[in-house]
Image: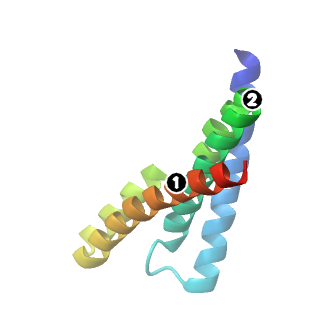
């Protein structure tokens, strides 16, 4: 149990650091008017989750799931940050962008995980 918890903790630190760097980079490139960084990490994370699920299942690597899926991707994707960003847009009176952000996040993340599953299944 301690080894698994250590894997999750290490993966979480890596994933959270990658999320932070992504958000900083996106804010520098695009600006701070819309939470593009959070949108990007949730879509990319969903895609990677689809790929990893297939690869680990086919390669017998489920022992890596705590590190990769719960740790890295759990630290990288940001549903709680997504919720805060959506509510902040709403409270600023930006109901249109808030609605677009929520719908875009959900629909594009679902499409990304489906694409990840498809790509990984096609390649393996």
Question: Most extreme residue toward the top, as rendered?
Answer: 1
- Give residue 21's mark: none
The correct choice, above or below, for 98 with respect to 75 in the image is below
How far across and how far down the image is residue 27, in percent? 58, 77
Which quadrant holds the N terminus?
top right
Residue at image location 44% in from the left, 64% down from the top: 108
The correct choice, above or below, for 75 with respect to 114 in the image is above
Q: Label 1, on which residue?
A: 113
Q: Which numbered disc, 2 or 1, marks the residue closer to the eye? A: 2
Q: Label 2, on which residue?
A: 60
Task: Give the quadrant of residue 65.
Answer: top right
SS for tag 1? helix
The answer to whether residue 38 of the structure is visible from this angle is yes
How far across and how far down the image is residue 91, in percent? 25, 68
Closer-to-camera residue (68/87)? 68
Closer-to-camera residue (57/6)? 57
Decide which of tag 2 and tag 1 comes sooner along the chain: 2
The correct choice, above or below, for 25 with respect to 82 in the image is below
Callout 1: few (<14), some (14-19), or many (20+) C-alpha neighbours within 10 Å?
many
Residue at image location 46% in from the left, 60% down from the top: 111
Callout 2: few (<14), some (14-19), or many (20+) C-alpha neighbours within 10 Å?
few
How far across and how far down the image is residue 76, in percent? 61, 52
Residue at image location 23% in from the left, 74% down from the top: 95
Asked if residue 6 lies left or right of residue 23, the reply is right
Question: Most extreme residue toward the bottom, as rendered?
Answer: 30
SS for tag 2? loop
Residue at image location 52% in from the left, 60% down from the top: 112
Q: How many marks?
A: 2
The answer to whether residue 9 of the structure is visible from this angle is no
Closer-to-camera residue (114/79)? 114
Closer-to-camera residue (4/113)? 113
């Amino acid at each position: 149990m301690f080894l698994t918890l250590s894997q999750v903790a290490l993966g979480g630190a890596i994933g959270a650091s990658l999320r932070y760097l992504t958000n900083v980079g996106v804010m520098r490139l695009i600006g701070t008017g819309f939470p593009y960084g959070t949108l990007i990490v949730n879509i990319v994370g969903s895609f990677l989750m689809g790929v990893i699920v297939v690869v680990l299942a086919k390669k017998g690597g489920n022992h890596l799931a705590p590190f990769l899926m719960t740790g890295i991707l759990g630290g990288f994707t940001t549903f709680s940050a997504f919720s805060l960003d959506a509510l902040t847009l709403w409270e600023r009176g930006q109901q249109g962008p808030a609605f677009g952000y929520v719908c875009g996040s959900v629909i594009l993340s679902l499409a990304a995980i489906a694409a990840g599953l498809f790509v990984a299944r096609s390649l393996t």
